[in-house]
Image (tube, helix red, strand yellow):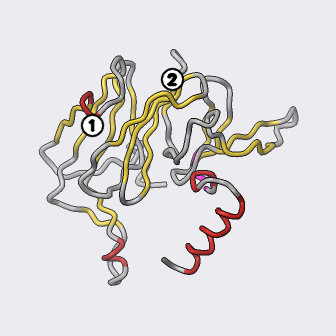
Amino acid sequence: MSLRKSQAKKKQKLSGVGEHETGTANTAVGYTPDGKLWALNESSAPFQFKLDEAGVPESLGFDTLQGTLKESISAHPKFDQKNGDILFHGRKMPEKFYAGKIVNGKLVERVDIDMPVAGFHHDMFITENYMVMIDGAMSFTPQEAIKGKQLWMFDQARKLRFGIFDRSKELTKANLQWIEADVAAELLGKPWMASH
C-alpha cells in the first residue's frame, strides 16, 4: 500500500466516516425524484446539497440513504421521475461490481454482478421496463501502467455485453440476462461524448 493511501486510511479511521463518504463528488449533478440535489462521483456516496434563494449551494453532507448505503454508487444513477425509483450501479475496483435500487430515500435492493474483467463500467441506462448494465471492451490494467503502458486498454477479444434486468422483478443474479454483441466495442455515454 502506498504512503498516500495509508495516510488516507488513517484519516478515514480517525474521522469515523466510511470509505464511501470520502469522495470528491465532482463528476455529475442529479436531482432525485424525492427532491434532493446530489453531487456525484463513482468513488463515494452521493453528496447532498441545497441551494438557497439566491442560488448559493449549501453542503448537507454525504447521503447514506438513511443508513442503508454502505458503499459508493456511480456518478450516473438513473432517476425514474414517473415512479420515483433510483437505479444505479457501483464498483470497488477491481474486486466488485454491483447494482441497486433506491425507493423513498432508502436502498431496498442490491445485487453483486459477476464481471470477468475490471472494465470501464461508467454508465448504464434504463427504459420503462428494463435496467441495462454495459460491459464493454475497455480493461483496467494498472499492471500495464507500471510498465509505462496505458491504464485503460481496449481488448479486441472482449465482446460488448449488455446485462439486462427486468424492472418488474427483484434485482438478483438469477434475474440478470446477458446479451453479447458480435464485436468488441465500448460505449462511453452519449454519442457526442468521447469521455468526460
Q: State whether residue 186 is above or below residue 172.
A: below
Residue 38 on image: x %, y %: 64, 39
Describe the element under mark 2 as helix, strand or loop. Answer: loop
Of callouts 1 and 2, the N-terminal one: 2
Which residue has dot 1 on it? 163
Q: Is residue 105 above or below residue 73?
A: above
- In the image, residue 27 above or below residue 3: above
What residue do we see at 51% from left, 51% from top? 42
- Residue at image coords 16%, 42%: 181
Which disc number belongs to residue 81? Answer: none
Q: Residues within 10 Å of mark 1 (few under 14, many from 20)?
A: some
Q: Is residue 178 left or right of residue 98?
A: left
Please name the amino acid that badge 1 sits on. Gly
Report the front residue among 130 and 60.
60
- The residue to which callout 2 is attached is 85
Residue 106, horizontal then vertical, whole percent: 57, 29
| The furthest residue to the left | 182
Q: Compare residues 111 and 155 and report the one nearer the observer.
A: 111
User: How would you rate the neighbour count of disc 2 (Cα within 10 Å): few for under 14, some for 14-19, many for 20 or more?
Assistant: some
How far apart marks 1 and 2 lie (CA) works out to 19 Å
The magenta-colored residue range is 23-28
Q: How many numbered callouts?
A: 2
Residue under the image location 62 percent in, 37 percent down: 67
Q: Is residue 49 left or right of residue 135?
A: right
Where residue 69 appears, as percent x and y from the top left, is 56, 40
Magenta part, dominant SS: loop
Name the residue nearer the viewer: 96 or 128: 96
Camera-side residue of 132 and 172: 172
Q: Secondary structure at mark 1?
A: strand
Residue 137 image point, x, y percent: 25, 55
